[in-house]
Amino acid sequence: MSRCKRSEELEVHPKRRGKGNRLSNAPAICWPYPANAPFCGPSGPSPEPFTEATKRQALQRAGNRCRCTTPRGGH
């Protein structure tokens, strides 16, 4: 699959429930995607919210681009 091309309305959303709120669990993804994100794992408790510093680092690490993938390579 291709990587999404969005660079606006990005959120930092947990990659895996139960894996904490560290940078390693903080991908930057586009706003409409989190509700349907297949990588979030089974339902369960969400980690503590990410700190603003972690959010900034996640966005910087992603090059301020969405980390999700879509069948058509964009929304």
Image (cartoon, rainbow, N blue to C red):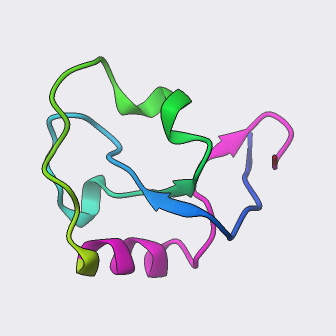
Vertical comparison of 24 with 33: above or below: below
Residue found at the far right of this picture: 72
Give the image location of residue 58, x and y in percent.
39, 71
* Residue 40 falls in image quadrant: top left
Judged left or right of residue 25, residue 2 is right
Judged left or right of residue 67, residue 72 is right
* Residue 33 falls in image quadrant: top right
**Residue nearer the viewer, 13 or 70:** 13
Instruction: Tell me if residue 39 is in the magenta stretch.
Output: no
Vertical comparison of 47 with 65: above or below: above
**Residue nearer the viewer, 11 or 74:** 11
Residue at 69 percent across and 70 percent down: it is 7
Give the image location of residue 36, x and y in percent.
54, 28
Give the image location of residue 25, x and y in percent.
28, 53
Residue interval drawn in magenta: 54-74
Residue at 81 percent across and 49 percent down: it is 74
Judged left or right of residue 57, residue 34 is right
Residue found at the far top of this picture: 42
Give the image location of residue 59, x and y in percent.
46, 74
* Residue 65 falls in image quadrant: bottom right
Residue at 72 percent across and 53 percent down: it is 4
> Across the whole image, how many numbered discs are drawn on residues?
0
The image quadrant where one finds the N terminus is top right
Residue at 23 percent across and 34 percent down: it is 17
Judged left or right of residue 61, residue 10 is right
Instruction: Tell me if residue 67 is in the magenta stretch.
Output: yes
**Residue nearer the viewer, 39 or 31:** 31
